[in-house]
């Protein structure tokens, strides 16, 4: 699961949510699906966090990297 892109992870997460919302899943399967969903959420959160870190830096014309602070 770790090798999935953000979009693939999100798509699988949506599939699990839809399946669980229908309520036609046996309890044991629902627990397994829930655990899979939690792993996918963690993968998505990690990928978003890395994306935020990479875009939170500004590269000046001279090549210097400056941390971008959105609160200023």
Image (spheres, rainbow, N blue to C red):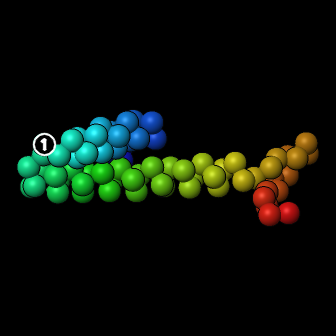
Q: Position of residue 57 (x, y in %)?
A: 75, 52
Nearer to me, 53 or 14:
14
Q: Is residue 42 visible?
A: yes
Say whether residue 71 is left or right of residue 12: right
Q: Residues within 10 Å of mark 1 (few under 14, many from 20)?
A: few
Horizontally, is 25 left or right of 70 in the view?
Answer: left
Nearer to us in this view, 39 or 27: 27
Query: What percent of the width, then of the height, locates residue 31?
Result: 17, 57
Is disc 1 placed on a helix, strand or loop? loop
Residue at 88% x, 47% y is 60
Q: Quadrant of the C terminus?
A: bottom right
Numbered-mark total: 1
Residue 18 percent location from the top left of the image: 28, 40
Residue 5 visible in image: no
Residue name at image x 23 percent, y 46 percent: 20
Q: Which residue ends up furthest to the right in the rendered image?
A: 62
Front residue of 70/55: it is 70
Can you say which quadrant of the picture contains the N terminus? Answer: top left
Q: Measuring 8% from the left and 49% from the top, which residue is drawn there?
A: 26
Q: Which residue is mark 1?
A: 24
Report whether 16 appears left or right of 4: left
């Amino acid at each position: 699961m770790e090798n999935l892109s953000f979009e693939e992870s999100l798509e699988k997460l949506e599939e699990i949510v839809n399946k669980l919302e229908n309520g036609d899943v046996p309890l044991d399967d629902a627990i397994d699906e829930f655990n899979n969903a939690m792993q996918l959420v963690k993968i998505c959160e990690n990928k978003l966090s890395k994306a935020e870190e990479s875009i939170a830096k500004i590269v000046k014309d001279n090549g210097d990297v400056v941390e971008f602070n959105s609160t200023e």
